């Protein structure tokens, strides 16, 4: 997460706002106090001057009302004496002016010679004489002395008649100095208050921002998957309640994540262990999820499948669009067969959508129908083979019986031969039906092995001896059998049938002068038996199919030799019932070898448990 800038921090913003509010309050209070103080001091100064001028006015009026000759200089002297008696530090100059604006006297000695007898041109004096009232004082700034001077005029009344006016200049600079001094004190107090306010504001802001910072750090930890950290609760106020709620939210998220993770693992486990393939797409039809079963069925890797269109992956882009698959209500077959391996799949489509009906994507379930198709094909082939195997002898029998019915039975030369053929075909059908019944019982597990412990070498040699004594063709037998007793637990009747069938096939396909070889080898936990001939052999493409029911590599020759095509299929079932395996190896033109194994356990003392 990006670091918060200093001016974007709530802490700094809170302190700044708090300080600005206090500063604004101090400014308003200071301005109001300063203005009020200034007004009060000015009024006090003006009233003080006015009170003293009232006494001067009384004395001046008395002197002006005294009867004197017009050329008597005593008035000027008397007025100067009166004015000098009221001199002070704050009064700079007092002038006495008569009703004709002539200056009669001044308190400044320097101005006596130049002003006395001169007419005053000051407007305030004229307004005071004319209006018979005192105009408002005026404050002027003396640039030479760099001080403020207040000018005021006061009419001198004799009853209702104005007999003159007093012009007063007073030094009001001390008032402003007092105001400046008080303002400096106020500014210093404001600075101290502001400093204390900032410090207090920082501490107050921390009480708000510390829980918020803790929550931010907890949110960052939660984003990284750490839900163990808790926010510290500093109090029971709103921030404390928020911290408690945040911790509760953390616990709920932890539980939800644990539940979600458990469900995800469960779903992943289900998907990975499903035999059916599962594919999920997004709303645009691109593959977003696929399990291993589906990858195996499609013979692809995940990097070749993810984010590709589903209809392209399934190879149906020419027949169906993604919109068609959304509307699909029935499963469709998919053929991924190759020359070496068949693969028939069936795809079922299910739409995932929100409550509003918005389509989120598709879920495709792939079911491998290869084995079912194979079973169905084998069933059809089995029915066809059984029908063919039964039809051939029945057709032959019908032909001979029809001939006998038409009178051939009277011919002593033909009738016995016809009856012999009919009997032979009947026995062939009986063998076929018996073999089918055996296979049927094996498929349904309706038979049990009647096992006993026997010495396999003795058992095997006895069967070979029987064939060797009864064989009618020039075929040699070669045996490689260990000179030890090999005790195995077998059903002798069923295993005799297996070995008889294999040896019979070897003799059928062996040429005159050929060799049939018998071999017994001891392996780690089994014995391996092989019976080999030097016959025509089997094409490599058909070697693995000779244990299928009714399969014949050379059908014409097999039927001529009277086989049903079920002998090796029965042998495979019986060997499997004994816990062994059976297989073949053949080179066309050189011969065929049939191998099978039987469970065998050798004791450490070299003796065999019977």
Image (cartoon, grey):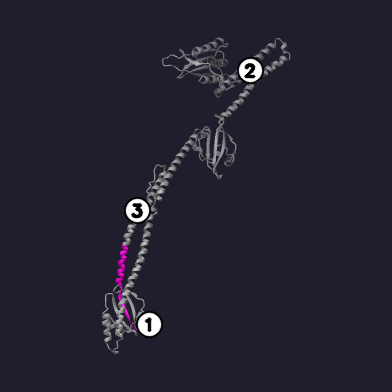
User: Please, is residue 517 above or below residue 56 in the view?
Assistant: above
| Closer to the camera in the image, 606 or 19 | 19
Residue at 37%, 57% (x, y): give it: 18
Magenta residues span: 159-188
Counting residues from the N terminus, which is met first, the one under dot 1 or under dot 2? 1
List x then y, in percent, for residue 131: 38, 81
In the rendered structure, the answer to whether residue 262 lies left or right of residue 380 reads left
Counting residues from the N terminus, which is met first, the one under dot 3 or under dot 2? 3
User: Please, is residue 344 above or below residue 572 in the view?
Assistant: below
User: Please, is residue 540 above or below residue 472 in the view?
Assistant: below
> Disc 3 marks which residue?
203
Report, in whole angstroms, how far the alpha carbon at label 3 lies from the one at label 2.
108 Å
Is residue 534 inside the magenta stretch? no
> Disc 1 marks which residue?
130
Report, in whole angstroms, how far the alpha carbon at label 1 lies from the one at label 2.
162 Å
> Disc 2 marks which residue?
429
| Closer to the camera in the image, 587 or 316 | 316
List x then y, in percent, for residue 528: 49, 18
In the rendered structure, the answer to whether residue 311 lies left or right of residue 118 reads right
């Amino acid at each position: 997460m990006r670091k918060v800038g200093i001016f974007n921090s709530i802490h700094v913003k809170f302190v700044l706002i708090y300080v600005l509010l206090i500063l604004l309050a101090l400014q308003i209070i200071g301005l109001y106090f300063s203005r009020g103080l200034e007004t009060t001091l000015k009024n006090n100064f003006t009233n003080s001057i006015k009170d003293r001028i009232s006494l001067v006015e009384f004395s001046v009026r008395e002197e002006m009302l005294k009867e004197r000759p017009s050329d008597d200089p005593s008035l000027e002297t008397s007025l100067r004496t009166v004015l000098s008696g009221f001199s002070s530090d704050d009064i700079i100059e007092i002038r006495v002016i008569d009703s004709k604006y002539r200056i009669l006297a001044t308190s400044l000695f320097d101005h006596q010679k130049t002003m006395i007898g001169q007419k005053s041109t000051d407007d305030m004096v004229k307004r005071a004489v004319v209006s018979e009232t005192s105009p408002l004082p005026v404050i002027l700034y003396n640039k030479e002395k760099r001080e403020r001077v207040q000018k005021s005029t006061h009419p001198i009344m004799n009853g209702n008649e104005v007999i003159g006016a007093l012009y007063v200049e007073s030094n009001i600079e001390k008032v402003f100095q007092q105001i400046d001094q008080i303002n400096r004190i106020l500014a210093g107090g404001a600075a101290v208050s502001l400093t204390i306010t900032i410090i207090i504001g920082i501490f107050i802001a921390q009480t708000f921002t510390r829980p918020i910072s803790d929550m931010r750090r907890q949110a960052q930890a939660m984003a990284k998957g750490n839900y163990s950290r808790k926010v510290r609760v500093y109090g029971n106020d709103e921030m404390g309640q928020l911290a408690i709620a945040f911790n509760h939210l953390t616990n709920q998220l932890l539980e939800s994540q644990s539940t979600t993770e458990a469900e995800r693992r469960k779903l992943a486990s289900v998907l990975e262990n499903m035999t059916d393939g599962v594919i999920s797409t997004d709303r645009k039809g691109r593959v977003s999820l696929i399990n291993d079963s589906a990858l195996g069925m499609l013979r692809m890797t995940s990097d070749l499948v993810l984010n590709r269109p589903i209809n392209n992956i399934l190879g149906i882009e020419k027949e169906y669009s993604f919109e068609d698959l959304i509307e699909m209500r029935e499963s469709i077959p998919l053929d991924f067969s190759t020359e070496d391996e068949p693969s028939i799949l069936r795809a079922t489509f299910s739409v995932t959508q929100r409550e509003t009906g918005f389509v989120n994507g598709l879920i495709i379930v792939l079911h491998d129908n290869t084995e079912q198709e194979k079973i169905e094909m084998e069933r059809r082939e089995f029915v066809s083979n059984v029908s063919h195997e039964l039809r051939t002898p029945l057709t032959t029998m019908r032909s001979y019986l029809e001939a006998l019915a038409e009178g051939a039975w009277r011919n002593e030369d033909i009738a016995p031969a016809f009856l012999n053929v009919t009997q032979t075909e009947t026995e062939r059908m009986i063998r076929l039906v018996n073999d089918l019944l055996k296979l049927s019982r094996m498929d349904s597990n309706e038979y049990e092995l009647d096992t006993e412990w026997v010495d396999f070498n003795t058992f095997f040699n006895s069967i070979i001896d029987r064939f060797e004594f009864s064989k009618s063709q020039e075929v040699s037998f070669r045996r490689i059998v260990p000179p030890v007793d090999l005790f195995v637990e077998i059903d002798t009747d069923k295993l005799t049938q297996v070995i008889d069938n294999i040896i019979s096939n070897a003799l059928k396909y062996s040429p005159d002068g050929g060799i049939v070889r018998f071999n017994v080898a001891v392996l780690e936990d089994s014995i391996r038996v092989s019976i080999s001939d030097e016959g025509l052999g089997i094409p490599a493409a058909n070697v693995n199919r000779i244990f299928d029911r009714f399969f014949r590599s050379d059908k014409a020759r097999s039927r001529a030799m009277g086989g049903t095509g079920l002998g090796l299929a029965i042998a495979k079932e019986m060997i499997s019932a004994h816990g062994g395996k059976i297989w073949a190896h053949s080179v066309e033109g050189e011969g065929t070898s049939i191998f099978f194994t039987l469970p065998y356990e050798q004791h450490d003392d070299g003796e065999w448990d019977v």
